[in-house]
Image (cartoon, helix red, strand yellow):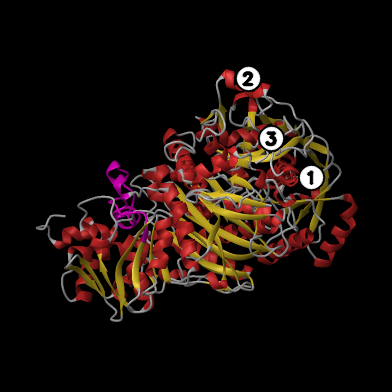
Amino acid sequence: MAVTEPLEEKAIALGMTLDELSQVRRLLGRDPTDAELAMFSVEWSEHCGYGRSRSWLRLFPKEGKFPPLVGGDAGGIEVAPGLFVLFKMESHNHPSQIEPKGGAATGIGGIVRDILAMGARPIALLDALRFGDPSDPKARYIFRGVIDGIQWYGNCIGVPTVAGEVAFHPAYQTNCLVGVMCVGVARAKELMTSVAKGPGNAVVYVGNKTGRDGIGGCSVLASQELKESLSLRPAVQLGDPFTEKCLIEACLEAFQTGAVVAVKDMGAAGLTCSTVETAAAGGVGMIVDLSLVPRREAGMEPWEVLVSESQERMLLIVERGREWEVERIFRKWGLAFAVIGRIIEEPVLRYYDGDQLIAELPPQVVASAPLYSLSAQEPAHLKEKRSFDFSTLPEPTDWESVLLGLLSDPDIADKSPIYEQYDHMVQTNTVVPPGAGDAAVLALKDYERDLAIAVTADCNSLYCSLDPYWGAQLSVAEAARNLSCVGAEPAGVTDCLCFGNPDKPDRYWYFVESVKGIADACRRLGVPVVSGNVSFYNESPTSVILPTPFIGMIGVLSNVAHHTTAGFKKEGDAIFLLGVPSGSLGASRFLRVVFGLEVGSPPALDWDREIQVQSACRRAIREGLVQSAHDVSEGGLAVALAECCILGNIGADVQLSRTHLPPSFLPLSSLLFGESPAQIVVSVDPKKKDDFIRLLNDLGCPFVFLGQVTGDRFCIALEGQSLLDLPVTEIADGWRSGLSSYLTR
Amino acid sequence: MRFGIIVFPGSNCDRDCWYVVTQGLGQDARFVWHQETDISDIDAVMLPGGFSYGDYLRVGAIARFSPVMNAVRRFAEDGGLVIGICNGFQILVEAQMLPGAFLRNAGLRFRCRPTFIRVENNATPFTVLCRPGQVLQIPIAHADGRYYADEATLNQLEKEGRIVFRYCDPSGQVTESANPNGSARNIAGLINETGNVLGMMPHPERASSKLLGSEDGLWIWKSLIHSFQTCGSVVPR
């Protein structure tokens, strides 16, 4: 930064607006120094300051059956007295678009440190991904790079990647989405906060050394539209999973000494964010000497040290006089440890470079990013798309090829080529591994003998693009249904809300409607939203992403033995549908795959029915009455049944009745491939059939008998007339090849 | 009996191994930091899986220089039982306590999945309770698990019965398609000349509970404990 450059130009180069600069001037009553300006630029960036989203996020419910824990680096729920599960999802989209492997890897690193900063041991990772059309080489390069980054970092740090979701659409071609979620566990006495306290206590820097990587990562890169360019590469951080693994162990060991008062990840906005936010939370000040910050690069300017986003670093506040107890542990793990400052009573942050004062700011001022009130407006074309006239479409005649087409659609196809690259077993808690059930189930054996949690990440972007309010609600409903299908009670939500440029009213409308949808859905479900992240500006000059509010949800199983998986289990079992067949084709995968259409309204959601079906499913699992459970989602009933056959490596004979046909256009397509919530396919041992039916009748839950698990063919007939009849091996081949072909090319 | 679980920076299956031998099998165990030099209180040494030193440079290549490895070597020379799992196997090979080398998986990718292995030699302290030819379902999770040695070494290993486990299909057939990583002759585990040091790529600690889908790993742990309790170790110390 040249000395002669006017402040205005410097501010713009740092990603600030001139309005923000004059606000800074007003708040300080003077011009900011270079270092101060850099600090404001990162703290007030949308990525850190949430100036465009904060007011809407207040809509989220914070109460549920399980006591929530909110307000820290991550949120959580108390799953048993004195035992907390902490979780949060965060995006790393622009870095991954520019440098796929490094961007995805450091996304993992950051979210893991957020969980660690709560005092929790990270026990699981999930990833929610979106890429461009996989037949495009650039999209495939990003796809493969992101998977590679997740496996490289996640596997090395010994945290299993147990669940996730991936979808492809041309709208993500210039803007991939990488949502990463981490789950951790802590006992009440182990919980940590990021509230700095105690004048005289040491401000301690631990972990990796600081370099010039990631400068402007949260401001220039994450809070603006993406003009892809190699020149942005330095704004992407460099990850080192080995150091992260050591940092996890060293931090957990250090917390046990009781000498650590507070802790904060040095993630986005690095040292600035961690010092400002811990001080602001505690109402104290700090004196920090930047010359004491461990560096891996000579000649760094003080402002660069303040905003660098070098990875694997944490800020600790350590009790005065006990620094050595903590230092010993970090030295043992081969990590940097430096006392870089002290807490002071006066609420002001003074940053020195040796003797020279380079920044002096009240933490509250830097921490309160300005709030923006933006206009939101529904895009004009949406109503027309929603009211598409289905009567113009012909009913297909070859149901077998429709089924095979859907099964090999990369969004529906087998995801094992991805999750086999992730260590999903380390820590030996993975009871239901990825692919086996609708959600992953993790035992908490190190804490409570029988207790387990289930985790899932979901979002139907197509629904959200046509109706963000109901699309978001349906995504929440599906996440909950996935948990219910493994036997878990939905207990808490985190979100990762990815949208385009919020300064454009149509983009902002999607965001606002989605937030309202999530808030209303979570209220109906009785689960709190405990943490989350907003990612705007997911657009390039050529395209904008589909609105994608990822939902991460945690469920609780009071007894780990009472879980189930999705595949049919044995010959002779009866197949039932919980709920009512009511396939709706609007915004369906069927329309996209068969007709290339993305139109219509997402299916209607009846929360009473949804909750009834889910709780009946959980109850049946808990009472040991079902052998398998799998929800009807993308691809509808036929795809759900086919997946149950493929996963169980066994056939099914399904007999549908004319009474099941919905009174709509394309009735057969709707019945077979329509998508409606509140439907779960279960299989039941004949010996337990009577008990199962009695339970459903007692609960008043509607159900339909569909047929039998049998043989090695997948057959569906209507009134005794065969609609499709395929060997399970053939549908399995289609399902398995859908995605793998894109990973090897 | 007391297990010593060696912890290198980057080990990540150390706690899983500890859980199985203490909580699952009721034995004593302690973590041994890689800089320790005295392991005289230990009855059997475990080198757990993970990414010691981030697997930087080459898998296991840095860990073998850790101070504890001298103690482990002496322990083995005195006839003590040593089991290296995954990264632990790779370290034993780098330390030349077992022959051969590891290459990148044939598919070039990390693979985490259930595999089946056949017990090729049940006259070892680690398999003594297994039937000959018994098939065990134990998962793998590695990127560099392709075992390699020259033909002469492989022939010698075969002749001396030192190949303890081979990847196979569920029925016990040793086939190419059952080989998850391209290992020479489907080798999944082998022992040293004196029979008291075992290296294996699959993770028995991940297959020691019904809840996790397989208890077959218990055959290995129980064999090891049985061997120690009946003879102290294979070779008299």
Mark 1 lies on a secondary structure that is loop
Looking at the rendered structure, the kind of residue marked 1 is: Lys
Q: Position of residue A72 (x, y in %)?
A: 46, 69
Q: Position of residue B196 (x, y in %)?
A: 65, 37
Observer-nearest of A706 and A445: A445
Residue A61 at least partly seen: no
Looking at the rendered structure, the kind of residue marked 2 is: Asn
Task: Name the residue carrying label 1.
Answer: A569
Of the numbered discs 3 and 1, the one sitting upstream in the chain is 1
Region of the chain picked out in magenta, as a range = A206-235
Residue B155 numbered mark, or none? 2
Mark 2 lies on a secondary structure that is helix
Q: Is residue A371 magenta?
A: no
Asked if both marks, 1 and 2, belong to the same chain, the answer given is no
x 42%, y 37%: residue? B57
Q: Viewer-nearest of labels 3 and 1? A: 1
Q: Tell me how far mark 1 sits from mark 2, CA to CA.
A: 44 Å
Q: Is residue A659 left or right of residue A335?
A: right
Q: Could you tell me which chain the residue with mark 1 belongs to?
A: A
Q: Position of residue A541 (x, y in %)?
A: 33, 47
Q: Is residue A14 left or right of residue B209?
A: left
Label 1 neighbour load within 10 Å: few <14, some 14-19, many 20+: many
Q: Viewer-nearest of labels 3 and 2? A: 2
